[in-house]
Image (tube, coloured by chain):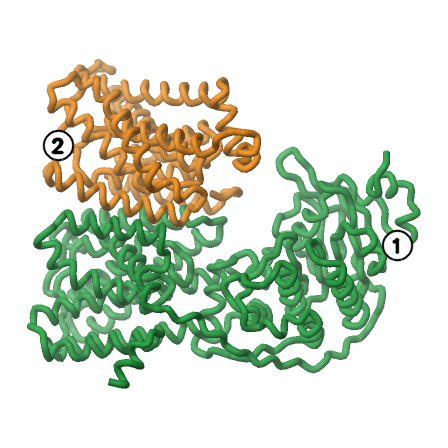
Chain colours: A green, B orange
Amino acid sequence: MNLTRSLLKSNPSRNLVLIILILLLLPTVSTDYFSSLVGKAIIFAIFAISLDLAWGYGGILSLGHSVFFGLGAYAFTITSLNIGTPFGIFLGIVLGVFVPIIIAALVSSFVFFSKTSPFYIGVVTLSLALLAEKMVIRFSSFTGGQNGLSGVPEFPFYGVPLYYFILLIFVLVVVVSSILVKSDMGKIIMGVRENEERMQFLGFSTPLVRTMIFCLSGSLAGFAGILYASFDGFVSPSLVGFTLGTQVIVWVAIGGRGNIVGAVIGALLINILSPYFNEYFPYVWQSILGLFFIITVVFFPKGIYSFIDKSRKSAVKYDVTVKPQEVKILNSKSNILNINNLGVSFGKLSILKDLSLKINTGELQCIIGPNGAGKTTLINAITGRNNPTNGTVVIDSSSIEKERPETIVDKGIARTFQSTNIVGNLTVAENLQLATANGKFQSFYQNTKEIHLSPSTDKLLKLSRLEEKMTLLASELAHGDQQLLELCMAIALEPKVLLLDEPTAGLTGLERKEIGKILIHLAHEDNISILVIEHDIDFVKEIADRVTVLYDGTIAADGTVDQITQSDLVKKVYLGGH
Amino acid sequence: MSLSILSVVLLNIVTSIAIFFVIAVGLAVIFGLMDVVNLAHGEFVMLGAYAAFITSQLGLNPWLSFVIAPVIVAIFGLFIEKILIRHLYGKIMESILATWGLGIILRQVIELIFGKDYKIAPYPVEQTVNVFGAGYPVYRLLIVVLALVIVALLWYLERKTNVGVTVRAVIQNPNLSSALGININRVYSISFVVGSALAGLAGAIIAPLVSVHSGMGINYVMNGFLTVLVGGMGSLFGLVGSASLLGGSESVFSFFFDPVWGSIAVILITIVFMRFKKTSI
């Protein structure tokens, strides 16, 4: 009794164990027909997990996931039927997994590396499913066309042993995918889903992350397709087609996306119930499913599993360790970043006009200027958010004006945004951990509970008191704290150059003073070059080593605080008056 | 290739472009204005085709279907806007999924009512014209004329009327428009109805050319989506251009190879085009 109670006490992994236990005991009480039905449902649950990895975890809305399932089934069947030896079956399994990976990689290389939206990805994947079905019917000499292919090599056992074999594979898939989504890499995948831009400016190649999860998902779908083909002994065009692609979306959405258990529950429930309801209320049942799907999507985006799982995401404690202070060779006042004749235009509108600027090592430089002067555009152009129309940006003698944001981060340039940009659905600690990954792929199985911070990040973390809020979700922080977190993340990248877009907007006077001190420390002690866009002239006077005035896309003045505040031009264009 | 075949091929290309356009235009109106993707657009087209079928079953003049279909689908669109779409303004992902579900329901309900068999809607005109010795159906030419009329009307509406100014204001900046006293919900609701009416009209237009059945929408709407992707949201003429590119390629490939190669061409062109396009949707 105690065991059942603790199993029923909701928690995703306990729920999974409970589901597996029920499935284990099933053959002892059910008919062969029912076991075979459940066997098929389990295979579909594996397919649903594959979609959940891409969609629920990766944020890739694949409306035609059946392409990968069907490709796996067909690649396996065609290879094994044509070769006909045990080696043929082996090769079939290999191809059944790898052909979907190749297609997924091909789709990714086009879709994720251009500017994307869920609409584009959805339409392309959906059109692939429609196309695949047409092609299977068209090229009937390979595929058997409309009639499909029968005589697919079956498992060497049947009945109850086959059921248990499928169940065993299912358990393995569940365990492996659960480990993946909880791993350090899993956090990166979710980070990209939640906030692609921030992840890019933390140095991650987000298209590559998406490609990776999409290929992984495709291969698992292909694997499910192999199982299905062999289980059923028959493949037909409906396996690649749009209808199955629709159904798997419905299972995952109703069950609960972004959660392995949710996808499993949805797929099992619907696939076990459907044969009965389809027999007695054919159209009504499908319409009810459709209606249920709409209601889920609009009102309960996390599916029915959100009603079962009431457990709040338990706050995981992270250990913070601090790296030893690096001894830096101070060659003060040397140029680190050179901007030459930089121009940025949007159509006929030019925002920056032949702007040249040098940023020195360990200098805290403030940029002021009226609205529309091009301050944010300057930072965007340096960091690769907008590509410059002309001119060069050189850091450490390498040109970066045509590079992608993640490459520029890798060269040592970090930034913050005017409107705070953090990964809201992850905790403060997880956000920091993402930053310390420095844009590199992390372990696919380990779930590290340790953050290795640079001394200055640790200092800021303590000063800002974020240290006490490490287990909170970033979205639960107050606005000022979010801004501080973003600053911490930028510093955790250990940049050579730090570009801050109004870091003190919306902060109280006291908080500004604190941030000011930290910035001065970062520049003078840690030797980081800092460029700050700032509106508050008093704050600028407090912190700046050098002030640059940007006006109408060019540099109007550049010098020490005193030189600038005395300048007539500045008084005219910035401090008011005409 | 003889002159008659060549001219028939060219005419087929032009009509194919017109069909791509009439299907895509309703979708573009809704997406461009409301940031809502109506994935059930194909089913709206299907409803329009069924309306044309019913019109002929009732013994009414087939020409009437060009009025009845848009009106029926517009009323249906109004209803759907009130109960569903209203919750989805500006949420692309949710709108894709919810309208996807709506499509599932519509296909099932129509199949429940009308059965699985293919229906036939009659041509309003059955004559052919002589094109260099080959007979070409007048109806297909009529589609081109209708498409041109839609282009002209929408262009006039957008550029020359107060409605157009309001609509462009809402697209540019919904919040500011709202602050200036424009009832943006009404603009959204009207644009969804207009988009639905256009889908219904498209359904009535293509009904005589195809077999009408519950699953017919998806293939047409796919081309519609790809056309909208390539054409971009902003401009009517962008849409005309992309309909020309994709519709033209489809009919050329279908003629020289077969329709499957036509579909492959349309998808490949879209993916490659989108890869190198600067702006995103």
Which residue lies at the image location 66% right of the left edge and 56% below the top edge? A400
Q: Name the foreground residue: A355 vs A506.
A: A506
When the figure is inspected, residue B261 is found, relative to residue B17, above or below; the finding is below
Callout 2 amino acid = Lys
When the figure is inspected, residue A73 is found, relative to residue B216, above or below; the finding is below
The furthest residue to the bottom: A2
Which residue lies at the image location 34% right of the left edge and 52% below the top edge? A297
Q: Chain of mark 2?
A: B
**SS for dot 1:** helix
Callout 1 amino acid = Val
Residue A218, horizontal then vertical, whole percent: 33, 62
* Viewer can see residue B5: yes
Q: Can you identify the residue that label 2 sits on?
A: B119
Residue A573, horizontal then vertical, whole percent: 83, 39
Residue B53, horizontal then vertical, whole percent: 16, 27
When the figure is inspected, residue B138 is found, relative to residue B100, above or below; the finding is above
Q: Name the foreground residue: A402 vs B30.
A: B30
Q: Chain of mark 1?
A: A
**Crowding near pointer 2: few (<14 within 10 Å), some, many (20+)?**
some
* Viewer can see residue A407: no
Which residue lies at the image location 40% right of the left edge and 73% below the top edge? A180
| Quarter assignment of residue B267 | top left
- If the image is split into quadrants, where does the C terminus of chain A sit? top right
Q: Can you identify the residue that label 1 sits on?
A: A561
